[in-house]
Image (cartoon, rainbow, N blue to C red):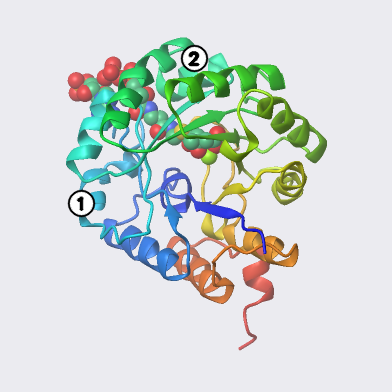
Amino acid sequence: MSRVRVVEVGPRDGLQNEPTAVPTAVKLELIARLAAAGLRWIEPTAFVSPRWVPQMADHAELLAALEQAPGMHYPVLVPNLQGLERALEAGAREIAVFTAASESFTRRNINCGIDESLARFAPVIARAGALDIPVRGYVSCALGCPYEGAIAPAAVARVAERLAALGCAEISLGDTIGTGTPGQARAMVETVAERVPMARLAAHFHDTYGQALANLHAVIEAGIRTVDASVAGLGGCPYARGASGNVATEEVVYMLHGLGFDTGVDLPALIETARWIGERLGRPPSRLARALTPAD
Ligand code: HMG
Ligand code: MG
């Protein structure tokens, strides 16, 4: 059976936009439950400025408290060398850098242009490489930008190629505001794959316009085998107005199993985790979790 690797981004992408800070203990329990449900790649936090994203201010405490069992991958977001140093001190073994295919979004998100962001990442990726720390690179606004509108697939491919050339092992293509549709998603991924091999690409689709599952299906047909998702569909990006959560992990896993892919994920345990975190945050369950909740 072929496998699709699911990267759970809920504890970072899902919680970074919560109106009130989620206690570190709740985040740790969420991560433990996700791992128990079979997820092996979980993005736990971001070593970004607490002034910019207060919800991730407990990054060092959280990562230091996280037991990193063999076989588990916990990549943390790092925007610059300062973030890398702090992440390493707290025990990071994998990192992710992040920029965008849109100049305006990059400025709003990380306070610099695309070229400058890549120049900042070069020493971060080099230092990580010297320590054998795998680096993932994100390209946001791959299917549209909240400030610039449509983004050309060629622009996404150029940034993806530059991240790969700097040493990113994997490039995750973000539909940050969820406006993409399946034909567009497939065309974008195929354009990027002309520069970076498909096996090194991941799809990171937000569900703001209800298109994420359809978009994922389209890019899986095109050959994508790594998919980012957020349990219970939590989240959004604080620098992309209207961005809702990533596609709900439980809905992705349900679709993938239906398509005959192996994910290694225990769907009932994941749905239970989605219900658990939804109750803690006062969030409605995903459609799937609602459908599979036993009647009282
Ligand atoms: P800046 O203000 O330009 O940074 O922010 P600076 O280097 O000028 O430093 C200013 C202050 O920030 C200094 O403190 C630094 O020490 C501090 P002060 O001297 O004023 O007290 N600082 C830091 N503190 C902690 N950790 C750091 C750090 N770096 C500097 N790493 C910066 C630039 C990148 C730091 C800022 O813009 C930032 O933190 N941005 C983060 C934005 C963010 O986290 N966005 C959400 C994640 S991206 C996303 O969600 C998209 C994704 O999901 C994919 C998709 O959906 O498309 C990945
Ligand atoms: Mg995101």
* Left-right relation of 217 to 147: right
Residue 37 lies, in percent from the top left, at 47, 70
Q: Which mark is residue 64?
A: 1
**Ligand 1 quarter of the rendering:** top left
For the residues labelled 1 and 2, the Cα–Cα distance comes to 31 Å
* Above or below, comparing residue 237 to residue 192 in the picture: below
Q: Nearer the viewer, residue 93 or 231?
A: 93
Q: Amino acid at mark 1?
A: Ala
Q: Which residue does the numbered mark 2 point to in the structure image?
A: 114
Q: Residue at x 62, y 25 (%)?
A: 146
Disc on the earlier residue, 1 or 2: 1
Residue 93 lies, in percent from the top left, at 29, 44
Q: Secondary structure at mark 2?
A: helix
Q: Amino acid at mark 2?
A: Ile
Q: Residue at x 59, y 35 (%)?
A: 174
* Above or below, comparing residue 269 to residue 19 in the picture: below
Q: Residue at x 61, y 55 (%)?
A: 4
Q: Residues within 10 Å of mark 2 (few under 14, many from 20)?
A: many
Residue 157 lies, in percent from the top left, at 63, 21
Q: How many marks?
A: 2
Q: Residue at x 48, y 20 (%)?
A: 165
